[in-house]
Structures are given as structure tokens and as C-alpha cells.
Amino acid sequence: MPEYLQQFARQAREFLGAHAARAAERADFRWGEGDDRVPYFGADPPEVEARKLRAARDWQRTRYEHGFGWISGPPEHGGRGLTPVHELVYDRLESEYDVPDTGTLSVIGLGMIGPTILAHGQQAIKDRYLQAMYRGDVIACQLFSEPDAGSDLAGLRTRAVASEGRWILDGQKVWTSVAQHSQIGMALCRTDPDAPKHKGITAFLVDMGAPGVEVRPLRQMTGGSDFNEVFLSGVRVPDDHRLGEVNGGWRVALTTLMNERATVGSEGGGPVAEALSPERLSALMRATWTWDDRALRRDLSELLADMMATGYLNARAFRQMQAGVTPGPEMSVAKLMYAQNLTRAAHFVSRVLGPRIIADTGEWGTYAWAELLLATPALRILGGTEEIMKNILAERVLGLPKEPGVDTTSPFRELP
Amino acid sequence: MTDGKEELDELREAVREFLAAKSTESAVRASQPRYDHAMWDQMARQLRLPGLSLPSDYGGDGFGLTELEVVLEEMGAALLCSPFFATVVLAARALLASADEAACARFMPGIAAGQTIATLAAAEGHASWDPAMVAARAQRTPDGWALTGKKSFVLDGTVADLVLVVARSTAGPSLFAVDREAPGLRAEPMTTLDPTRPMATLTFHQVPAVLIGAEGQGGRLMSQVLDLACVALAAEQAGGARRCLEMSAGYAGTRFQFGRPIGSFQAVKHKCADMLVRVELAEATAREAARLADKAAPEFGVAAATAHICCSQAYLFAATENIQVHGGIGFTWEHPAHLYFRRAKSSELLFGGPAVYHERLLDRLGI
């Protein structure tokens, strides 16, 4: 690590040492002891969720007050003025401490929407929201996907019509994470249906408390509700809440998507990663007397080899970023693999468990895996379906031609 | 070890340029089953490749596996036919693993300078690298040792000047050095699926030999050499897989059917993306294993086993799908796709293949 980073790392350690406890050494795993849940999605009861959210906001405020809340942000908006590399270094250090999970604030709001406001927002909006977001006061969500616009995001239909110096929004958004906790949302709307689909979209910042905004939880196949539907009915948005140019919203959206938080290290921790460690999987095989099943052992090796390879790929991207080199396609590949690895792992475990994963015998560490199994179909869809990710890899990395079509040249209203 | 990406890129560029000129497709096809001595000399004199990763005490340049990995990726991509792998990886690593300083001082400078072609004869008729399966015998004689037995799958066994042999003495498997001209040694080429990697059967009848290292340490030595050989092979495989991907992407972008490039069809496009994913993973594992070897990190064994699995699978997948993307032309003798397919299949199984490599990974993980 170069000297300027070492100095920053010392400051970060000092801050963390004063405000957080070091994470406890992971206790030796013993079959049958501790929590056996393998949750990919949160499934906390409401009062626990509320308590965790308060803790997350408090911790973000503490970070901010000590200069670690917006490390790469510009000083005129309350940021620290350092680089994304500093941010990576801080994240690595913080992972050694026991601190509240701030994902509700940071994944979408601070990671994606903050940079978008910074790049495309009008001055009044930057002044009003940026500092408040990074101080933990304002949570933001992303109002992008619609029932008829999933992979084909540019086919969105939510309308925004100009009226007396402001905009009136009507439509429906779906798969919106953290909308129930958000004060603002970034909405993509159709403003010119006569233009080709990418050229008639405008981006807005919507006050989630405004009249006409309705957030309804969406119950997913796991039985839990981790996403929402957001209905916009005659919602009034002042023109200074517009991001970017009128009909220039696609460019704004690309800024948001490009800031989709790097998946570096995302496999490194958490209860799922721990449950899928070689140690835990072999303990599971011992406990179920499948230890010497040759077919299962081969499956396990195939799975672990790919999980390890994905980890190496992530680590390489991290080292490149730390050295100031922009990584190649590693992140996209790692995302694809992460989804596949987790899916394969859940099915591997179910083959080990046999009928114990279709009905609960009460035995520790068996039926509990159903939670992960039911979550895995989401992984190959969310954040860009596997099919779209492969298109992107083939077109941007390998230079293969796009599928020919009229949908990018015809007026939006003429598309089927 | 070089610390910078720039140095590695420069090395890669130099090797790539050399191979583009010397290891052309026609050279690859023509060199079967022998290699080109003049090119080997140039590789040694101009690029100093044989000595690159060997210790400077023995005439090498003292770089690590990280640098060797780059060279091997390029050699794999170009399907280079040469005794480089047998000499620099198998034989030289076996000498180093023996910790026999006298033997290293005697044999290594010739290897580093490119004057000695060497190989390691470990496997026998059953192709196993399990030391328990070594049947070749070593007996003491008044002036040393004599070997009797048969070794198969010996890489470049008909051209090696120096043959290192694992044979069983009363103390167990041990390493011996044999001169190719020694009386009682017969080398016969095997017919191989992959003509770019010649193999031989060596028959020993009371062949005079020199003991390398301590008697009975052959088992440990085979396992150490195998880990390093798997990483080196992984580098070749990653390079070969990358080349198959490039061939497929290039062809899919220019071959027209139904009035458009076939690469614009998702069925073909996604096949290429799947190849890219496998190639990226393969490279990451091969490079990580080399990096950990250079750091003498305890996780090296796991990384080596992982690289062997991932790179074997990636190469076979890429070589197979490369033929599919090319369609009929990819199945012709004239098209190079089958050369990669042959190399990929042969590399996957060279050290035993899935039948043993999965258990090796689980073993390294303590499972």
C-alpha cells in the first residue's frame, strides 16, 4: 500500500477503534450450535427491522461526522474529497469491526443515486439532498423497473407531463428496494412518446411523501417482502427536481447503473458465505452420513472450485482497483458466477439433505436451508438478468454485433 | 519476482511476438512429432526463457512462477511444440524439490541455458501419479544404481538428454537421473491424441543411474512437483482457452447467415459469453496459484488444485464450443480448431483428470 493510503488507513483504524468493537473471532464451528438460518433476504420482524434501520442511520451519521461517510465526495457538498481507492481501503478495514449494516442507505442511495445527483442534479437539489443523504438523514430508492419494462428498461411507460412549471407523474414502478424507508426516489419517466424509446425519457427526483405516491410491499416467492410496488398517481414534481436534460434521462440512468456498487468482496462475508464455507459443507456431509458418497463429493469439488475461482477473480479486481487500474470484465463475470454458485450450492445442499429439506424434522441445520433454496431463483434475475449480462459481455467485451431491430429507431408509441 | 503489471505485459508481448513468428499454424503442424531445434536455441538465447524462473545460483534469472505463468499462457495459446514444459517445469522442479545441491549444480545450468533437454518419468502403464503405484525398481550396484522397469506418458521422452526417473528402492520411491545414451534404455514414441505434445514409453533394463536427493523421498517429491506442474499446465490451458474464445468471437462477428453475422444471434452470442466467463475464471485461478506459489503461501495447495480443475474444464469447454461456433469448417482437418480440442482433452487427462483431481482438491481442503 502506498504511503498516502497508509496514512489514511491509520486514521481510519483510529476512528474505528474509538467507535466500534473489533468483530469477534469467528468461533469454531460446531454442528448443532448457534443460529442455523441461511437468510439471503432479510426476514426480520418489523420491530427488529426498525431497530436495525435506526442503528444504520446512527452509524452513517457517526461515519459522516468523522470524515468517513462520503470519502470520495467533493468537499463543497460535504464530502472528504478523496478517491474511490480510499473508499475501498476503508471498507476493507471496517469489515474487521462489528458495526451496523448500512446497506439500506448505502447500496442504492449513497452508492448509485448520490453520484447521479452529483453528476446531473441542479444546484438547489444538490444543496438540499446530498449532505443529508450521506449524513444518514435521507434514504433514496430507485424507481426504474416497471411491469412492462424489466430487461428492456428503456421501454418504460410511466408518464411525466409538463404543466405550469412543474411535472405531473403517472404510472407504476416495481421491484423497488427500500422504498418503504425512503424519503426520495429517482424516477425515470416517458416525456416524449414520439421519440425513439431511449430519446424520450427524463429523470426526476420524487419526494416519496408527496400526495399520489403509494408504496405497497411486494410479496416474493420466499414468502417475505423485500421489494415494493410504487404507484404514482398525479404526483407533482417541481422542475428543479429534474435530473439532466428533458428527454436526456437515458444518459442519467446510465450514470446510476454504472455506479452500481462494485461486487468486490461481496462473497467475502455474511451468513450465506459462512454457511457455504468448505468447513461447513463438509460438516453437513458428516452429519448426514453422506461423507463418502462419491457423486456428492464430486459435486462438492466442482462447486468449491468455482466458488474459489470466483473469489480469486474478485480479489484480482480488488488488487487492480487498489493499484489504480480499472478492472476489465471481472465484476460482471463475478456477478454471473455468484448467482450460479449460490444456486448450485443450494441445490447441492438439498441433494445432501434429501427429504429433510422438504419437511421439517426439527433437526438443527437441515430444513433451515429451505430459506436459501427459495431465494436463489432471484439471483439470476435481479440487477440484470443472466441473459442481459451475457449480451453485455458479448457485445462490450467481445465486440459481437447487437441484435438488429427497429425498436431503437422507431417512435416509442409505434412499438408493439 | 517482478512487481509491476508493466513488466509482465512487456514479457507477454515479447513472447507473443516471438511465437507469432515462430510457432505459426504451419510450424505447429509441421513439427509433429519433433520440435524445432533452431527455435529452441533462439528461445534460450534471445528470450532466455528456459532459465527465466530458475534460481540465479544455478544460472537462471531468478524470477518466479508469476513470470513463468505469463510465458506458459502464451505458449499454450500458440500450441507451441517444444520440450519446454517437460524440461523447465517437470524436470527442473523435480531437481529443486529434491534439495540435492550437487545435482542442481550439475544439471540445472544446462537446463537454464537451454543446452539440456530434460524430462521426468513418473507415471507407468496405468498413468497414475500415485507414488504407491510406482513399480520400476532401483537396485544398488558397486558404482551406483541400476533401474529396471517401464515408464509411459513420458513427455518428450525420445528427445530428452536427461531423464529423471521415479523408481522404487528398498526405502520406497526415489528420484534418479539417467542419461539418454545410457545402455539398457529404450525410448519409443507413443501414438498420441494430441500430436503437439509428444510422449514416449521408456523401457529400462539394468540402466545405470544416479540417486538424486535422499532415498525414499520420491513420494513427497512427486506430490510437490505435481502441484507446480498443475499450475504450469493451468497457465497453458488458460492461454489455449483464451485463443479458442478469440477465434470464436472473431468468426461469429464476420460469418454471415440469414443475412446477419451469426454473433448477433443470442444462441451464438451467449455461447461466446459463456466461454468468456470460463476463460476469465481460468486465468484468475492460474494467476492466483502462481502468485501464491511465489509467496510460499499455505493456501497454495488449494489454489493449485482449484486451478487444475477450473483450467481443465475451461479449456475443454472453449475448445469444444469453438468447433460448434465454427460449424462444418471447424470439423475439417485444415482448420486449427481440432488441434486445440486435442490439446485440451490431452491436458485435462495428463495427470489423471476428474477421476483424481476432485479428490485432490477435497484433500487439500481437509475434507
Image: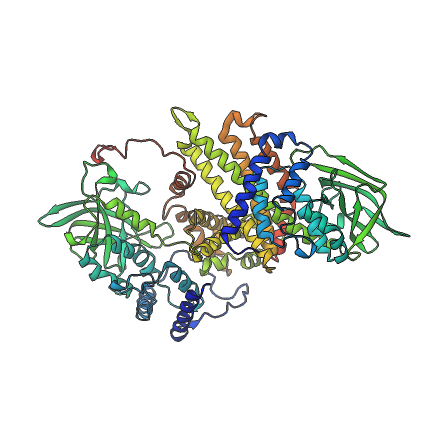
Answer left or right for A265 relative to A413: right
Which residue is nearer to you in this view: A184 or B48? B48
Answer left or right for A167 relative to B150: left
Answer left or right for A379 relative to B12: left
Which residue is nearer to you in this view: A221 or B84? B84
Quarter occupied by residue A7 = bottom left
In the rendered image, residue B58, in percent from the top left (x then y), is placed at 70, 54
Residue depicted at 48% across the width and 49% down the height: A341
Q: How is the image coloured?
A: rainbow
In the rendered image, residue B187, in percent from the top left (x then y), is placed at 78, 37
* Residue positioned most to the right: B142
Q: Is residue B285 above or below residue A86?
A: above
In the rendered image, residue A366, in percent from the top left (x then y), is placed at 50, 57
Quarter occupied by residue A107 = bottom left
Q: Is residue A83 above or below residue B67?
A: below
For the C terminus of chain A, give its image quadrant. top left
* Residue positioned most to the front: B46
Q: Is residue B67 above or below residue A91?
A: above
Residue depicted at 52% across the width and 25% down the height: B329
Label count reads: 0
Quarter occupied by residue A387 = top left
Which residue is nearer to you in this view: B211 or B55? B55
Q: Is residue B220 visible?
A: no
In the rendered image, residue A362, in percent from the top left (x then y), is placed at 49, 60
* Residue positioned most to the left: A164
Q: Is residue A343 visible?
A: yes
